[in-house]
Image (cartoon, helix red, strand yellow):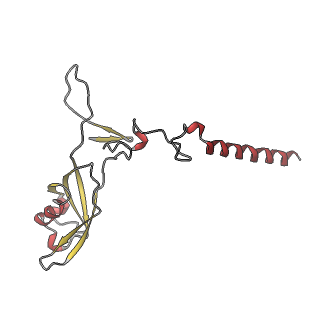
Amino acid sequence: MWHIDNQSMFVAKWKPGLQPEIPELSYLPVWLDFHNVPPQFYSEEGLKHITGTLGHPLFLHPATSNMSNLEVARVFTIIDPTKPLSEAVNVRFDSGHIERVEVSSPWLPPTCDHCKEVGHSIKNCLTAPITSSLCQSTAHKPKDCPKAKRQSDTKDGERKKRKKKKEG
C-alpha cells in the first residue's frame, strides 16, 4: 500500500478483463517505535515480547539490533490497521515492578471516521455526507452555508462603511 496526496494506492497482479478491487486491509506491515525501553528488555527477545502485544514482530531495525540508538527501539511489525495503536505498553519485571514503554509509528494509513475503512479519511470518503467546513453541518451544502452568507454580508457592510468614509 502506498499513500500519495491523501490517496491510497494498491499494487496487485493484473490480467486483461480483470476488474480492480480495493483489498480489505486486515494486516499492514509498519515500523513501530518504542521509547523508554528498560535496558533489561532492550534485546531481540525482549523487544519481540513487547511488540507481540501489538502485532506480529518481524525484525528489528539495524540501529536497534546493533544498539546504536538506545533512545528509540524500532521493530518492523504486522499490525491490524482497523484497530487503534496503543500509545503505550506496560512491561513487567520478574520482581513484579511495572514500567510503561511508549509506542508510536512514523506512519500509519488514515482510517475514515465515517465508514471505518483504512486507506482514506472522511474528507475523501465517497459515502460520507458532505459537511460544511464553516459550521460542520451536513444539513446543507457548503455553498449554501448560513455562516458563509453571514461572513460575506459582514464583509460587504464593512466595505461600504470604508467607501462612505473615504467619500465623506
On-image quarter of the N terminus: top left
Residue 102: quadrant of the picture? bottom left
Instruction: Pick out the residue farthest to the right.
Output: 168
- In terms of depth relative to the viewer, which is nearer, 95 or 163? 95
Residue beneath the point at 23% across and 74% down: 99
Asked if residue 6 is positioned above or below residue 59 in the image, the reply reads: above
Q: How many labels sit on residues?
A: 0
For residue 52, side relative to residue 160 (left or right): left
Q: Residue at x 24, y 42 (%)?
A: 25
Looking at the image, the residue that sits furthest to the front is 139
- In the rendered image, the residue lying farthest to the top is 17
Residue 55 in picture, x, y percent from top left: 18, 55
Foreground residue among 12 and 74: 12
Where residue 88 sits in the image (x, y, percent)? Answer: 27, 65
Quadrant housing residue 105: bottom left
Residue drawn at 80 percent across, 47 percent down: 161
Choose top left, top right, bottom left or bottom right for residue 74. Answer: bottom left
Residue 109 location (% of width, % of height)? 31, 47
User: Taking 95 as reference, is 83 above or below it?
Assistant: above
Q: Is residue 47 left or right of residue 156?
A: left
Tell me residue 168's x, y (percent). 89, 47
In this picture, residue 74 sits left or right of residue 111: left
